[in-house]
Amino acid sequence: MSDFAVDHSALMDKVYRQQRHIYDLTRAWYLLGRDRMIAGLDARPGLHVLEVGCGTGRNLAAAARRFPLARLFGMDISSEMLISARNAARRADLVNEIRLAQGDATTFDPRKAFGLSGFDRIFMSYTLSMIPDWQGAIAQAMKNLGPKGELHIVDFGQQGRLPRWFRVLLFKWLDLFHVSPRADMKSVLEDFAARHNATLEFTPLYRGYAWSAVLRLS
């Protein structure tokens, strides 16, 4: 990893060293749309599926239950979070079904990490709002997709149809955890779709609280 990535890894480890123990309990009520995104993966038997920023492994375990014959992989820049992800896989008896690796989302090499050339599905759940070079992370994910691959994203929206006070309070609170909702996500994804000859499905959820997006390579 680059020096910047090493610094970001250390920051994430600091943020989550203690939080990882209660992360899933405290996030369940506001990381909305995750299970909707997982259901939309349609990971048929044998497909290779990667979660970028897998965190505690909660989403990978859910994907394994829904798509038991898919091949699941996860990566995260935080070694602390990967401890929780490995523990989650062990508790769910999914150690052989889920492979994990540490890495930087903007430079992640699937061949070095897993001996693979790419993935059929890649998904990012509330990850882009925590990655400083979030557009670089999207670019690398697109690079790591195989033919007709799909990139699935769910993340914070701009709270467009919610009260202004709610947006102000939420964004101040998120800033405490180094989370920055990306106001221009739709236009950035439209640009990626055009550059990669891909289709984009972009859906505001819960009155703009969250955004869901799918980029599909043709």
Image (cartoon, grey):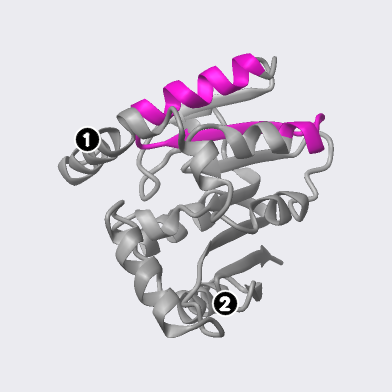
> What residue span does the magenta drawing correspond to?
64-91
22 lies above or below 127: above
The stretch drawn in magenta includes residue 51: no
Q: Residue at x 57, y 38 (%)?
A: 117
The answer to whether one can see residue 183 in this image is no
- Callout 2: SS: loop
Q: Determine the residue positioned at 50% across, 53% down.
A: 141
Left/right placement of residue 23 relative to residue 72 reads: left
Residue, disc 1: 10
Q: Is residue 107 above or below residue 103?
A: below
Cα separation, mark 2 vs mark 1, equals: 32 Å
As helix, strand or loop, the secondary structure at mark 1 comes to helix
**Kind of residue at disc 1:** Ala
Compared with 129, 9 (above or below) is: above
Q: Position of residue 118 (x, y in %)?
A: 58, 42
Q: Quadrant of residue 79?
A: top left
Residue count near mark 1 (Cα–Cα under 10 Å), binned few <14, some 14–19, many ≥20: some
- The answer to which quarter of the image holds residue 102 is top left
Q: Nearer the viewer, residue 204 or 168?
A: 168
Q: Label 2 neighbourhood size at 10 Å, few (<14), some (14-19), many (20+)?
A: some
Answer above or below: position of 164 versus 92: below
Residue labelled with disc 2: 208
